[in-house]
Amino acid sequence: MRAILQYFSLLATTLLLATTAAAQPQTLRVGPEEDYPSIAAALSAADSGDVVEIHAGTYYEHGLVVDKPLYIRGIGYPVLDAQEQGEILTIIAHDVTVEGLQLQNVGVSYLKDHAGIRVRQRSRAVIRNNRLVNTFFGIYLERVHEAVIENNELSGVLRDEASSGNGIHAWHCEKLDIRDNWVTGHRDGIYFEFVDNSKIVGNESVGNQRYGLHFMFSNHDEYHHNRFADNGAGVAVMFSKFINMWENTFEHNWGRAAYGLLLKEIYDTRIEDNHFIQNTIGINIEGSTRIVYQRNEFRRNGWAIKMAGGCLDNDITANNFRSNTLDLVVNSNVNNNTFTGNYWSEYNGYDLDRDGTGDVPYRPVKLFSYILDQTPEAIVLLRSFFVSLMNFSEKVSPVFTPADVLDHQPSMQPLSL
């Protein structure tokens, strides 16, 4: 009897060890001198939880599908070259990590949004430390929940708008973390449509054709510590609410319709501690309500803030307006918008009690800005004596500009932001 018990105990131990060994992730190595000469073969042979390790070299493969949880890592930045034939890597499994690859030459498609890496209807994807070159769409997230897109370099080829895709494109997603990426040469650097509860942090989006960052119908998101420079326009936030924006830099976004930041039909947002430097328009606002603009720096822009109709209950407080051509354009009723405690470099009032606040309210809207809004060609008269005289007369006795657009507590010195 004892012998039988010992036998079954040994058998159970053996089965347990075998099961444990089988459960351990395996590493499948891809390379000219490795077990797998192609990435497709390694992906097919891998089991859930395995590591697919791709060694340095160039692999002319596309249409690769990841349908199980895997860790795909590159050694020495192996190149996956699609030779303009289509999408390279499509992820249709949960818990997939892709790291250390260079993906290139997807090819332009007018029928399908081909991408370097696509994640489709899955959760917990991690895409980090990759290089995507000439990939039409770079990283495409489609109905994804909880993904991290981190420290990737995405470099597109500037073509016309119809022939260019977005760098990082997210559609119907939630809880994304887009962090520390560098994006250039795309239509939009980063694009969010129906994306909620997500973060965009520490990215550089420069030299893109349309927008550095573009929100559509997205709510409860935040972006901070990013830089948007030399794009067609810096950032557009449209038809969204609860999008908080702080400590970003918007600079050198020049052109006929170039903005540092475009706000259209957005609600309940805070815009704080940002820098708007040398943009055609620092912030262009249309139909946006309950927005707090606080501690922002507007320097050397054409228009610092241009506010159109339908803007209600906005609070513009404690900002610096320095050396802008026009600090503020308002072409409608004030509608409970307040302008308080800002520094205006063109303010020439006095401070008799030396409390740091001007004793005379400041009117930031010039008559010439009203004329420019009606007749843009009048810009050629900007520095003329006639315009200076006209602005002075309107300041003394307002007739055309909104009489209730006043900063009652203008700061005498630039604010420390």
Image (spheres, helix red, strand yellow):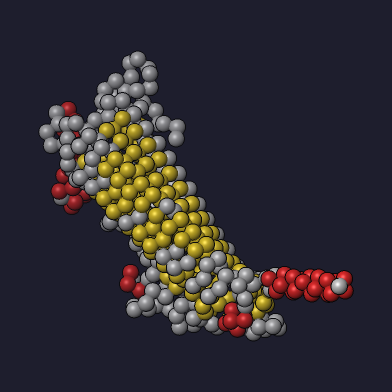
Taking 115 as reference, is 271 above or below it?
Answer: above
Instruction: Looking at this view, name the residue that lies furthest to the front.
Output: 1
Please name whichever residue, 196 or 118, is drawn nearer the observer in this view of the structure. Answer: 196
Q: Quadrant of residue 236?
A: bottom left
Residue 331 percent coordinates (x, y) = 18, 43
How many discs mark residues in the rendered view? 0
| Residue at left offset 38%, top offset 64% | 171
For residue 34, side relative to residue 184 (left or right): right
| Residue at left offset 37%, top offset 17% | 354
Answer whether residue 388 is visible to the viewer in this image: no
Please name whichever residue, 208 or 252, is drawn nearer the observer in this view of the structure. Answer: 208
Please name whichever residue, 377 or 334, is drawn nearer the observer in this view of the structure. Answer: 334
Taking 249 as reference, is 403 above or below it?
Answer: above
For residue 257, side relative to residue 225 (left or right): left
Q: Quadrant of residue 233?
A: bottom left
Q: If the image is split into quadrants, where does the N terminus sit?
A: bottom right
Answer whether residue 25 is visible to the viewer in this image: yes
For residue 70, side relative to residue 16 (left or right): left
Taking 144 as reference, is 373 above or below it?
Answer: above
Residue 311 percent coordinates (x, y) = 23, 43
Q: If the image is split into quadrants, where does the C terminus sit?
A: top left
Instruction: Looking at this view, name the residue that lies furthest to the left.
Output: 399
Residue 186 percent coordinates (x, y) = 41, 66
Residue 321 percent coordinates (x, y) = 34, 37
| Residue at left offset 33%, top offset 69% | 161
Q: Quadrant of residue 333?
A: top left
Taking 379 as reference, is 290 above or below it?
Answer: above
Please name whichever residue, 14 or 76, is drawn nearer the observer in this view of the structure. Answer: 14
Instruction: Looking at this view, name the residue that lies furthest to the right.
Output: 3
| Residue at left offset 24%, top offset 48% | 286
